[in-house]
Amino acid sequence: MNTLLEDAQAAGASVGLTADRITINGGKPLVGRIELKGAKNLVTKAMVASLLGETPSELRSVPEISDVRVVKGLLEVHGVKVSSVGADTLMLDPSNVESAHFEVIDAYAGSSRIPILFCGPLLHRLGEAFIPDLGGCRIGDRPIDFHLESLRRFGAVVDKQPQGIRLTAPNGLKGAKIELAYPSVGATEQVLLTAVRAEGTTELRGAAVEPEIMDLINILQKMGAIISVDTDRVIRIEGVERLEGYKHTALFDRNEAASWAAAALATNGDIFVGGARQSEMLTFLNVFRKVGGAFEIQDDGIRFFHPGGKLKPVIIETDVHPGFMTDWQQPLVVALTKAEGVSIVHETVYEQRFGFTDALVDMGAQIQLHRECLGGAECRFGQRNFNHSAVIVGPTELHAADVVVPDLRGGFSHLIAALSADGASTVSNVGIIARGYENFIEKLRALGADFVLEA
Ligand code: EPU
């Protein structure tokens, strides 16, 4: 596996960011307007879905982030022609997918979790698939057992080899009854992308129902799939013989929206996040308001601002949708260091998503991590010795420090911390942030941040 620095450099370079470090003169409010594009966690899957079509697909509102580059590279290795039309539209033409160049897949996989989602589409198209060692943020063990078990239920044969996993489907793929032990986003997408072309009906119980999954279902339906979603996490898919390409504008990135909202709050700022919508962010908006943040919902976006006064502590438990998303927790924790009193964040989705708090403590925050499930129900990690609850005692004034980005969302929280701290902080490995935040350097500039980039 690559080092964190190598991952950061590769991710940054792929979107033209040559700097490894940013020195931020903090203590100034972020004020202004930024525009969102499509959600990283939808766009990358939508690109994979194009493999299932017999005709080209057109995906709009694609952000310029390195995870998109990684998936583009992987699709091209498999013979999909990917071309850009205008600023943010991709044409994905799968008509020449005949065989995969397995020997080069590894080089393209980068630090991404997406290759696992190629399995179903490739098994349908080619009868085989090869999945290299998976990357992604270092925020927990991140097993793929649900994925492999689901694929076996469809009839795939899974062969684990030293270089990766080889899959074949000697008897084709057939609809199956599948129940997930936990509503995994990726495993739900795996089942959807496989079931739509499998013979017969698939019933998925315990499915994740994140808005990004609903948008993937929208795309698959446009392609010709038959999918129904019940209110009790049950998804039924009737397999069809042929799917066409799609035309689709990707759902906005609500994780990025929440990140800028947290940045506005922590820096006493005022940011209009163009493209953000209320309905996919209800849970975030409730918490934002409880902490003391203010927002105004407009037709073309949401204004997030610090209305003055003291911030208040909250108790949050991260959860699958419609709960409070795990990806929102890291940026918001920075604002919680400024709230008057004791906040608790119980992380129930990933067992190790508090690594980023070490840097905040170095900057003067009072944060203690606990193995117990604090502030809510017992979760899967309760008896397993993971520091997955954080107690944040505020208010604390953050002071400048030199910090190293550990993962995507943790990295953004380090940026926020540096922006809100007095003095000059250096944040290293910023390329990691380019995995999921489009043009974040230009956006910081537009919001009036005072910083210098260093190679
Ligand atoms: N899990 C298993 N076995 C599996 C799959 C998942 O035990 O086979 C566990 C995971 O270890 C984790 C939990 O289930 O504890 C949830 O994982 P999930 O599969 O839902 O996550 P994912 O699909 O790998 C996506 C996003 C994450 C986001 C989560 C939760 C993408 C590319 N990634 O990950 O996004 O946090 O869903 O919503 O869509 C990010 O954007 O920074 C990010 C990490």
Image (cartoon, rainbow, N blue to C red):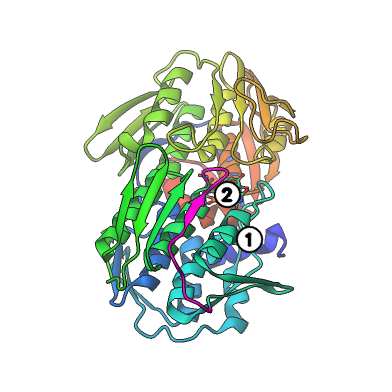
Where residue 169 appears, as percent x and y from the top left, is: 53, 75
**Which-is-in-front pick, marks 1 and 2?**
1
How far apart are labels 1 and 2 at the CA level? 13 Å
Magenta segment, prevailing SS (helix, strand or loop): loop
What is the magenta range? 170-183
Q: Which of the image's four quarters has the C terminus?
A: bottom right
Residue at the spot 40% in from the left edge and 79% down from the top edge:
80
Q: Is residue 324 above or below residue 193?
A: above
Q: Nearer the viewer, residue 118 or 434?
A: 118
Residue 376: image quadrant is top right
- Residue at 40% x, 50% y: name it: 213
> Quick check: 89 above or below 313?
below
Q: Is residue 341 visible?
A: yes
Q: Position of residue 412 (x, y in %)?
A: 55, 43
| 377 shown above or below 321 | above
The amino acid on which the numbered mark 1 sits, given as a three-letter code, is Gly
Q: Amino acid at mark 2?
A: Leu
Residue 18 in sight: no
Q: Residues within 10 Å of mark 1 (few under 14, many from 20)?
A: some
Is residue 358 found inside the magenta-colored segment of the image? no
Direction from residue 41 to residue 180 in the image, left or right: right
Disc marking residue 135: 1
- The verdict on label 1 being within 8 Å of ligand 1 is no
Residue at 42 percent of width and 34 percent of height: 322
Q: Quadrant of the N terminus?
A: bottom right
Q: Which residue is mark 2?
A: 408
Name the spot of residue 69 as percent of width and height, x first.
Answer: 48, 67
Judge the density around disc 2: few (<14), some (14-19), many (≥20) Cα neighbours within 10 Å. Answer: many
Q: Check residue 275 in the rendering and tell me which mark sits there, or answer none.
A: none
Q: Is residue 178 magenta?
A: yes
Q: Secondary structure at mark 1?
A: loop
x, y (%) of residue 256? 44, 44
